[in-house]
Amino acid sequence: MHSGNMSLVRAVIPGFILQSEDLNISTDSSWRCKVDDAVKILSAKDWDRSMGPPLLLTNERVDGGKADKEWLAVDFDDSEWDTATRYSMKVHMLPILEPRRLVKRTIPMLPETEEQFSQVSKTDSNSAEQIASWDDLVKRAKPVQVSENSRVTVVLDSALLTTGLLQLHFRGGARSKIRIRCAECFEEAPDADNPNLFARRKGDREDTSGVLLGLDDYYSVDSNSGASDDAQYEPFWFRTFRYVELSITTEEMPLKILKFSYRASHYPLDITTQFSSFPTSEMKNQWEISLNTLRNCMHETYEDCPFYEQNQFAMDGRMQILFTYQLAHDDRLARKCMQEFYSSRRPDGLIETHFPSPFPGVNIPYFSLYWILMVYDHMMYMGDERLVRRYLGAIDGILDHFSQRVDVNNGLVGRLEWDTWPFVDWAPEWSSIAPGGDFRDLAVPPSYRRTGFSTYSSLICSYTLKKAADICDFVKRCDTADEYRRRAADLNNAVLTHCFRGDFIVDGPDSPDAERSQHSHVFAVLSGALEGESARLVLLRALTEQGFVRCSYAMSFYVLEAALQTGIYDRIRTSLLEPWSTMIHQNLTTWAESAAMPRSDCHGWSAVPIHDFVANVAGIRPTAPGFKVIRFEPRRSFWENMSGIFATGTGLVLLSWSPGNPVEFTPNFDVRVEVPQGHGSYESFAVRKSQTLRLDIE
């Protein structure tokens, strides 16, 4: 038995409630209803396992003969429908509440924008005439007729990977069978013997010579449909696609396709951060692809990937929210995300790894730490003390969960609960499943598998403890802040004692020298375990020499932060961004999940160029809660002529520079600005609203 989709919440007791303020349409017995026997949601047994686990079950099989035609029309006759029945959980003289309470929607409604496909990629015959006729349909709304007793398959290209609501309008075609397959790209056929269900083989995303793996919707045309009868099909939930394959099999009556298009739908983020131009076409592509990636991972929640899972993960969400702050002064979806994870708290102090979800999933304990970082980012960008105070108890509970697992002998964070997944990163070297193992072997350092200890465990805890200490300082919980910093220092000392080999850090206390990863070194820097020249040399070696497990796209944000902190960013930025150059050359229009696991072509955590362009190259980041202080540290060598507008948590900043001219920094709000003076020192300026600060920064 499969309980169904992992990301869409549904009630244990079905029902519908509407409370209207302006119109008298609140739910009562005047409403009518019926069971829709025409639509069946495909179950896990219908899932193509070559695409990985059946995490997203939203596809449909529709019997057009059972469907109510035009039921949305004002004059539709609903006399055959049942009268809605009101029911209550209340019992006389018992203190029982109703199971539901309506609250106002906290995010805006998702707009739907009419779009058409860009081109016809291929048809079953690939004849010029057939391609031209389908091209006329998608570009000029000229109907296409599929003759009787025939089969036609056509693949349409939307040019950019997108999310939207498909809409197919047709006429006639009694008993015809229609299949709609949505896919991200063509690819090599999967290896049936590979136990790793996440493994895929993808190349140029515009190469249509491979197989098209995707999710299918099925529609059977009404057997009583006349030659002049019109009908339409629109799946209930949005679909994700770059390519859509439409396959039609007719019987005795031809089927005329009147329209096949979609309504693009995403969270309506009003992006205010803008660059007037880019120094290279590649940087322009990096920016635009990053925006498209983030956009397609924002709907009712943040999503890891819109195609396969649509799960809101805490690790992914931390970065996606940060990227959102850097684009727009809009934290509504971020607040919703933080509150939803807060609502998922477990008895062991952790939050659910992904939420909302209709049932508990396998927990990744480290992801709870990323939720704390999510709260920290909101503090720094938005400065809402009331929000921070609300989450203090949950923060302490998460940190205590890891504190309870610190080994009394070596002081390191030890083994987590047996049924959890100690996921770290999709590194290629960590992407195999041991004989008799399962997916929980993936993305885990070998040291943890052997002993339950990994250097990363202690360092990510230390890093988060320090951020939590800053949160406590913000709300004047200074004693707790001091405690967190002491605990972080203890973890750092334990790592240096048991895992530091002088020139590098190994992945666990018993690890041989060969077991070393960039991850341990990156978080040794971010946690403060390594500082100064030692941190610089050790990190530089880990990021430039062979023999270290490399961080994947998911960890690239933290790699860039560590490089910046140690002063090696300028030296290695180009090499760190090479994976994004590779994806551009492969014609992706969104960023993939990882190089080792290229299952998903659209993963929000990979939109790192947004952060890099804004915080690192333009050099705008907060150093005090609520963006009250901006550290302005531009890197002109990466952008010769800069002109842009940047969103902050308080207002907008206008920024420009060009060769031979000073940098001009103009905020539309009062702010204190820190600018570099060399050797790690900064000079602070009070800048008034609309005042232009001119600086000679090279």
Image: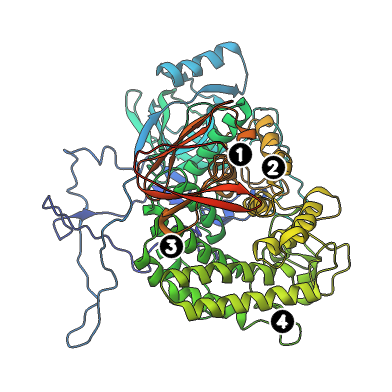
**Disc 3 and disc 2 in contact, CB within 8 angstroms:** no
In this rendering, is residue 454 above or below 54? below
Residue at the spot of label 4: 411
Q: x%, y% of residue 597?
A: 70, 49
Density class for disc 1 (Cα within 10 Å; few <14, some 14-19, many ≥20) is some
In this rendering, is residue 240 above or below 206? below
Density class for disc 2 (Cα within 10 Å; few <14, some 14-19, many ≥20) is some
Decide which of tag 2 and tag 4 comes sooner along the chain.
4
Residue at the spot of label 2: 570
Q: Nearer the viewer, mark 4 or mark 3?
A: 4
The residue lying at 53 percent from left, 59 percent from top is 313
Decide which of tag 2 and tag 1 comes sooner along the chain.
2
Is residue 442 at least partly visible in the picture? no
Specify whether 360 is left or right of 189. left
Specify whether 697 is left or right of 234. right
Residue at the spot of label 1: 635
Q: CA distance from mark 4 to mark 3?
A: 31 Å
On-image quarter of the N terminus: bottom right
Density class for disc 4 (Cα within 10 Å; few <14, some 14-19, many ≥20) is some
On-image quarter of the C terminus: top right
Q: x%, y% of residue 62?
A: 43, 44
- Along the line of sight, the residue nearer the viewer: 243 or 131: 243
Residue at the spot of label 3: 338
